[in-house]
Image (cartoon, rainbow, N blue to C red):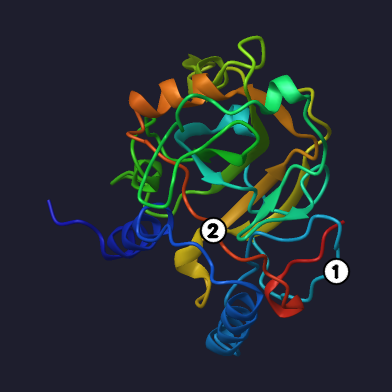
């Protein structure tokens, strides 16, 4: 059966978002140049509100409006992945990194003690105790099951699903008693919906806003996809070794932390936050 045109376009847009580019930024001058290019390349073209953003800056003048996605409990979990460093800025993750943001608090010497080897390695380097990640639980209104890449959020029967991301920033610690990443990503069916069973509930009231898909492939161009975001303001300490074990085997075929998109700062590309 021939794939519908709209579904093909959406699938292509989604597929570039997580996997196409994990490059790190080249410093503040490079970020400024990319931000300028983003504003220039989206000017007057009708792009909707973008993500990520500074969660403490509530202003925005983007005129595109879309309906907020249902609660995650009324949608199907379709993908889980994480980014090295936080894509958003706010709450307990406000310390600037080479790209994105890091946990602004302090760890004990034991929590920060280096592991014997990095976990989740790739060509840009792996993860160590003390590193920050931003975990994305991606949900879709399409009738789908969890799987690799954001293409798992689509179905032939629903070429225009609503999307929601429940985001949790985490700090990797050298502590076997810290949160278990396998538990945080455990899957199951609840009330007829595919769900992540243990999305954190004690890391603050999620900050919600209208935005887009993220990832560094959108540093200089707008994302056409609409996403309802919920970002928890408090950081969760997670056992670094458990993150490494997950990277070696999971249904999403994720094996490393992806790059981050620059913080979107152009008011014309941000939705006002209530």
Image side of residue 199 versus residue 144, left or right: right
Residue sitting nearer the eye, 128 or 70: 128
Is residue 185 something that shows in the picture?
no
**Residue drawn at 86 percent across, 62 percent down:** 58
Q: Earlier in the sequence, mark 1 or mark 2?
A: 1
**Residue drawn at 62 percent across, 60 percent down:** 98
> Splitting the image into 4 quarters, where does residue 255 fall?
top left
| Place of residue 202 in the rendered image (x, y in percent of width and height, measured from the top left) | 79, 23
* Image height of 43 relative to 59, above or below: below
| Place of residue 109 in the rendered image (x, y in percent of width and height, measured from the top left) | 75, 25
Which mark is in front, 1 or 2? 2
Image side of residue 105 versus residue 85, left or right: right
In the displayed image of the protein, which residue is found farthest to the left?
Answer: 1
* Image height of 103 relative to 227, above or below: above
Residue carrying label 2 = 214
| Place of residue 259 in the rendered image (x, y in percent of width and height, measured from the top left) | 49, 55
Is residue 245 something that shows in the picture?
yes
Q: Are marks 1 and 2 in contact (CB under 8 Å)?
A: no
Instruction: Give the label on residue 59, or none.
Output: 1
> Splitting the image into 4 quarters, where does residue 89 fall?
bottom right
The quadrant of the rendering that contains the C terminus is bottom right
Image side of residue 209 versus residue 29, left or right: right
């Amino acid at each position: 059966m021939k794939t519908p045109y709209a579904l093909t376009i959406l699938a292509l847009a989604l597929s570039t978002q997580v996997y196409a580019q994990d490059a790190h930024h080249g410093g503040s001058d490079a970020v400024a140049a990319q931000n300028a290019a983003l504003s220039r390349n989206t000017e007057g073209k009708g792009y909707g509100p973008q993500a990520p953003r500074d969660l403490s800056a509530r202003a925005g003048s983007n005129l595109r409006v879309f309906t907020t996605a249902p609660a995650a409990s009324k949608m199907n979990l379709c993908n889980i992945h994480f980014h090295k460093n936080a894509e958003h800025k706010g709450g307990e993750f406000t310390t600037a990194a080479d790209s994105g943001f890091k946990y602004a608090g302090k760890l004990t010497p034991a929590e920060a003690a280096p592991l014997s080897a990095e976990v989740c390695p790739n060509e840009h380097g792996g993860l160590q105790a003390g590193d920050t990640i931003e975990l994305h639980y991606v949900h879709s209104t399409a009738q789908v099951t969890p799987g690799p890449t954001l293409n798992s959020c689509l179905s032939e029967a629903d070429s225009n699903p609503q999307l929601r991301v429940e985001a949790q920033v985490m700090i990797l610690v050298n502590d076997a008693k810290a949160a278990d990443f396998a538990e945080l990503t455990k899957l199951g069916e609840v009330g007829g919906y595919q769900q992540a069973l243990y999305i954190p509930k004690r890391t603050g009231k999620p900050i919600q806003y209208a935005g887009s898909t993220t990832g560094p492939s959108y540093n200089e161009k707008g994302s056409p996809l609409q996403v309802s975001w919920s970002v928890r303001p408090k950081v969760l300490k997670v056992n670094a070794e458990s993150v490494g074990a997950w990277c070696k085997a999971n249904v999403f075929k994720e094996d490393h932390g992806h790059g981050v998109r620059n913080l979107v700062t152009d008011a014309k590309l941000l939705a006002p936050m209530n």
